Image: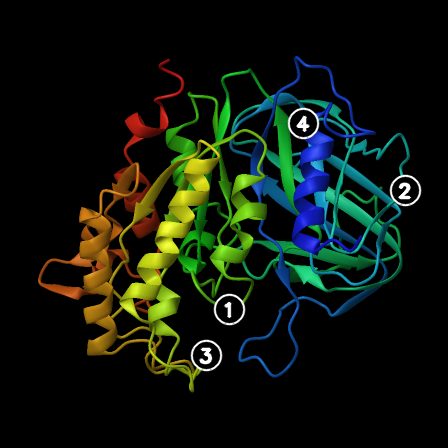
């Protein structure tokens, strides 16, 4: 039987984490795992797309080191590696993980008891549990040795995070002094923590604004990061499933939201809530250099897409919050990517926002438009919140977005 990569990813993650339903991954019933950090995989693209991948198209006997900041802490962790869009296996010679500050030695990961493992095409690979006591918001350093030629077919673009790449096996190196610094993520897709039974994960599901474009690189100042700080004493994790260029209805710099909702949201261990912020690129891309021949998106199509996400979340018992779309007058002007904004596009954005606020379809609404818009010119971002490209907020804007999320909605489970 042929199984689509999306189904294989969801099945393999559920099998490894949820236990008895899987043939070879039975965990004690008292274990409860949640996603504490996440980077949504994207398929690689070629030189015909406007933007560069910013990561190598292949690796050859190299080591890479990534830094991630957890949201919720725990006593034990498991790392998840993804080859969701790969067409060939990815071989991991060895992976080590430890506190980024070097406060304790790094530990080697095992996969079904072995240090070396392979990520099957279309699948994920989940490590065995590692005893590592980590506080909320702790930073981890993850070093992976790839001993064979590896074609990069699945990765995460941008994310305002850099990683280091160096030749050879550098697992023992405290620093990659001869390495290359690149932007993005390769293969590492999530960190799970063992948590109390009531602990849970909130998934932020969106586009480049959720992925943090415009924030200070390597500083963890995306709006989901600020939200994690607000929830630090609740034991609630925040997983960032934002993808730059993401769209609700169609593929962009990744699969459409409708296509990846199962993998990036519904299959997350411990998920109880999703906060959706999507639609800006559906409105902005048509007629721009990103989709010059594409017709404008229709209001009815967008509404149908939001309805599908709500139905899918509610079918799993997941609480869904949807945000309004921020203003973007002047977006990317004076760049090769100008054309994102027009008066007609702004009218569509406002029409969609009115519907989101009044539809009564979602469990909650967060009004990011109201938070970020200039009161004197509501089609444009407030100057103090603008990163400078008139599309993405900066650090202050992302902090204001996180502050607008109603925590009473997210805390309802803990209060029971």
The label on residue 116 is 2
Q: CA distance from mark 2 to mark 4?
A: 23 Å
What secondary structure is marked by label 4? helix
Name the residue carrying label 1: 252
**Residue at point 73% right, 32% down?**
16
What secondary structure is marked by label 2? loop
Q: Are marks 3 and 4 in contact (CB under 8 Å)?
A: no
Disc nearest the viewer among 3 and 4: 4
Q: Nearer the viewer, residue 341 or 317?
A: 317
Location of the C terminus by quadrant is: top left
Q: Please state if 199 lies on the left or on the right of 111 as rendered.
A: left
Q: Estimate the x, y position of residue 157 in percent, counting from the top left.
A: 58, 61
Density class for disc 1 (Cα within 10 Å; few <14, some 14-19, many ≥20) is many
Density class for disc 3 (Cα within 10 Å; few <14, some 14-19, many ≥20) is many
Sequence-wise first label, 2 or 4? 4
The label on residue 290 is 3
Q: Are marks 4 and 1 in contact (CB under 8 Å)?
A: no
Answer yes or no: is residue 2 visible.
Answer: yes
Name the residue carrying label 4: 18
């Amino acid at each position: 039987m042929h199984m689509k990569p999306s189904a294989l990813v969801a099945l393999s993650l559920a099998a490894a984490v949820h236990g008895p339903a899987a043939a070879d991954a039975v965990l004690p019933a008292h274990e409860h795992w949640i996603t504490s950090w996440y980077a949504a995989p994207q398929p690689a693209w070629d030189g015909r797309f406007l933007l560069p991948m910013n990561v190598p198209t292949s690796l050859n006997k190299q080591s890479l080191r990534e830094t991630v900041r957890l949201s919720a802490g725990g006593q034990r962790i498991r790392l998840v590696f993804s080859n969701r869009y790969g067409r060939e296996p990815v071989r991991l010679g060895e992976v080590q993980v430890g506190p980024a500050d070097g406060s304790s030695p790094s530990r080697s990961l095992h996969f079904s008891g072995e240090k070396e493992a392979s990520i099957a095409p279309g699948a994920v690979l989940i490590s065995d549990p590692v005893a590592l006591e980590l506080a909320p918001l702790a930073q981890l350093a993850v070093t992976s040795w790839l001993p064979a030629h590896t074609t990069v077919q699945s990765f995460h673009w941008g994310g305002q995070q850099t990683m280091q790449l160096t030749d050879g096996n550098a697992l023992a190196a405290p620093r990659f002094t001869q390495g290359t610094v690149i932007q993005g993520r390769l293969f590492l897709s999530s960190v799970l923590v063992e948590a109390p039974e009531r602990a849970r994960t909130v998934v932020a599901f969106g586009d480049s604004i959720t992925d943090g474009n415009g924030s200070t690189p390597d500083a963890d100042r995306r709006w989901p990061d600020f939200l994690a700080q607000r929830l630090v004493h609740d034991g609630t994790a925040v997983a960032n499933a934002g993808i730059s260029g993401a769209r609700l209805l169609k593929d962009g710099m990744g699969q459409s939201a409708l296509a990846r909702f199962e993998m990036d949201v519904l299959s997350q261990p411990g998920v109880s809530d999703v906060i959706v912020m999507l639609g800006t690129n559906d409105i902005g891309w048509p007629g721009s250099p990103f989709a010059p021949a594409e017709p404008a998106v229709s209001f009815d199509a967008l509404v149908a897409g939001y309805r599908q996400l709500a139905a899918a979340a509610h079918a799993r018992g997941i609480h869904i919050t949807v945000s309004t779309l921020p203003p973007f007058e002047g977006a990317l002007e004076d760049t090769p990517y100008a054309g994102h904004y027009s008066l007609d596009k702004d009218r569509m954005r406002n029409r969609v926002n009115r519907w989101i606020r009044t539809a009564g379809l979602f469990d909650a609404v967060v009004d990011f438009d109201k938070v970020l818009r200039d009161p004197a010119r509501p089609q444009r971002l407030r100057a103090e919140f603008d990163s400078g490209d008139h599309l993405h907020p900066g650090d202050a804007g992302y902090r204001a977005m996180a502050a607008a999320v109603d925590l009473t909605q997210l805390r309802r489970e803990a209060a029971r």
